[in-house]
Amino acid sequence: EVQLVESGGGLVQAGGSLRLSCAASGITSDEDAIGWFRQASGKEREGVSCFGSGDGRTYYAESVKGRFTISRDNAKNTVYLQMNSLKPEDTAVYYCGATGASWPPCLHYSAMDYWGKGTLVTVSS
């Protein structure tokens, strides 16, 4: 059974940094599309950053380019999201999602077949 477990969320001040982790089991992260999504209160879930299926290509939402970096440790089946220069607008529950499919693009949340339960990131001003 596929399981995704997020960790690393917390409360930080604007301008600070945080690193999220997603531990995956039942899938191989270098073969399957996997990435990070977030959902702020009252808003729809949106893609933040992901690895495309099979090719290792990375994708970022325009709002986080230059501030967030996705990485992975294949030996540990773990995907990370390094978040720098955090803004209050980044406050959301962050979810890890994965799929074996290559379409639709991995930044679209509907592409994901498996989800973690999320970790809360709160950025204070």
Image: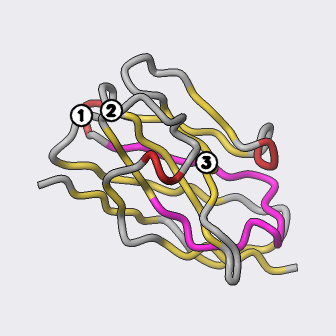
Q: Earlier in the sequence, mark 3 or mark 1?
A: 1
Instruction: Tell me if residue 25 comes above or below residue 100 in the rendering.
Output: below
Residue at horizontal 81%, vertical 69%? 89
What range of the chain is rendered magenta? 78-95
Q: Nearer the viewer, residue 26 or 83?
A: 26
Residue 10, image x and y in percent?
Answer: 58, 76
Q: Earlier in the sequence, mark 2 or mark 3?
A: 2
User: Which residue lies under the disc numbered 3?
Assistant: 82
Q: What's the distance in space between the residues labelled 3 and 1, CA to CA? A: 21 Å
The answer to whether 37 appears left or right of 33 in the picture is right
The kind of residue on which mark 2 rests is Asp
Residue 43, image x and y in percent?
Answer: 70, 74
User: Which residue lies under the disc numbered 1?
Assistant: 28
Mark 2 and mark 3 residues within 8 Å of each other at the beta carbon: no
Q: Secondary structure at mark 1?
A: loop
Q: Residues within 10 Å of mark 2 (few under 14, many from 20)?
A: some
Camera-near label (1 vs 2) is 2
- Residue positioned most to the top: 55
User: Which residue lies under the disc numbered 2?
Assistant: 32
Residue 9, image x and y in percent?
Answer: 54, 70
Mark 1 and mark 2 residues within 8 Å of each other at the beta carbon: yes
Camera-near label (2 vs 3) is 2
